[in-house]
Image (cartoon, grey):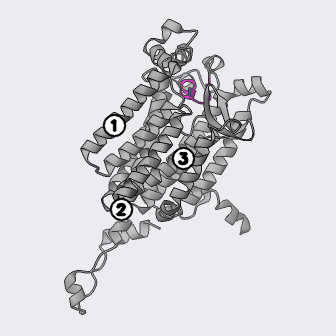
Amino acid sequence: MKLLQIFQVLPFFDRTVDKWATEARLLRWLTFLWLFAGLAILFSASYPVADLAFKDGTLYFKYQLAWSVIGLLIFNVLVHLPLRALLKTSPIFLFIILALLYATHIPGLGTTRNDATRWLSLGSSSFLLQPSELIKPFLILQAAQLFGNWNRTPWKVRVGWLLVFMLVLGGILMQPSLSVTALCGITLWLIALGAGLPTIQLLGTASLGAMVAIASVSFREYQRRRIMSFLDPWQDQAGDGYQLVQSLMAIGSGGIWGTGFGLSQQKLFLPIQYTDFIFAVFAEEFGLFGGICLLLLVLIYGTIGLAVTYKCKDPVTRLVALGSTSLIVVQALLNVGVATGVLPTTGLPFPFLSYGGSSTISCLFIAGLLIRAAREMATADVVIPFARSDRQNPKNKRPEKSETARRRSHTVS
């Protein structure tokens, strides 16, 4: 009996799943499929590098597996925790991680890799905390809470939280990480769009974001070089265009059916092949067919997420679903766009595939939020208010729930 209770801590042995809404169950299994496929791909992509550097080809895989277990435990708690409890505590965690985000800029605390200071060391170079990844789910929660109650929120509170969002985006941009800044900015903008904010405000915010991006590129030479190399990487194959050229060669080498699992050759030459360019390794080993299947998985995930968004009755829950879906799907598509040369080279991981503890935990946290929103999407239907005549005439009985409402109340635990 005790062993069974221990097993229930893991999401695979959850006995309550049969009572969940169909969308929640589908998203749960798609998350597991995406995560476990990612572990297999990471094993292949990271083995040669880990074997050369540490004499242990499975090192990165073992670390990723450990982070995945931690993420799944958090995931299992979230799908059983009411969103209202998460929304109450989200400001606290947002400010804590915001402090950690700016702590990366303090000499001696932040860890720099590839000219970017985005990490805090946890006592070992192998265990790094990336606040810009961990802040994403709390940014979604707070944005949903703000924009979902926009018309009922005083102007002072609106301005205060908008300034906090600007501090978050500014702190990420200073690291520097233009891609993560853009991803978080796009997510916030989509949540505001879903909340129905005035068009003039949305257009003004989008214009401001574009100007900030242009200014960042103008003042940072390496970002300008990336854009120039993205336009024609073959002109500087040994320099700024090296990553993209190797990525394109890997994707092209895969052909239609791929070289086979573990048989990628370009991963021996492709930089950061187990993080930002892991899709290129996947495309080489599984070919065009595998790449299409992976994109279909992302699109199906996004479609179900948007269906949940449409069915949610509570505005805040709807925006949590929208923000969670947008961040995961947009991040995956941006990563594919970089690997295929459609977008400029940026340091943006592929959700559930790329190596990174902070990214894995953040993605599982966001997936948990989406599934929890799916479980709560029909709760507003089961509440049937009294009519005025019912209050005045005590003989009138409260209307019974419809069959649909009874079915939904049974579905939502």
Residue at the image position 45 percent from the left and 43 percent from the top: 166
The residue shown at (33%, 53%) is: 310
The residue lying furthest to the top in this view is 235
Please report the bounds of the magenta region as a residue range. 272-282
Camera-nearest residue between 14 and 275: 275
Q: Earlier in the sequence, mark 1 or mark 3?
A: 3
Q: Quadrant of residue 397?
A: bottom left
3 vs 2, front mark: 3
Seen at 54% across and 64% down, the residue is 16
Q: Where residue 141 sits in the image (x, y, percent)?
A: 46, 54
Q: On the image, numbered disc 3 is attached to which residue? A: 135
Q: Amino acid at mark 2?
A: Asp
Q: Is residue 221 magenta?
A: no
When the figure is inspected, residue 153 is found, relative to residue 190, above or below; the finding is: below
Query: Where is residue 262, by image quadrant?
Result: top right
* Residue found farthest to the right: 55
Q: Secondary structure at mark 1?
A: helix
**Element at badge 2?**
loop
Badge 1 crowding class, 10 Å Cα cut-off, few under 14, some 14 to 19, many 20 or more, is: some
| Residue 350: x %, y % from top left | 53, 34
Label 3 with label 2: CB-CB less than 8 Å: no
Q: Is residue 280 magenta?
A: yes
> How crowded is the residue under tag 2: few (<14 C-alpha within 10 Å), some, or many (20+)?
some
Q: Which residue is mark 1?
A: 206
Residue 314 numbered mark, or none? 2
What is the number of the mark on residue 283? none
In this view, the residue farthest toward the left is: 389
- Is 130 drawn above or below residue 53 in the view shown? below
Q: Amino acid at mark 1?
A: Ala
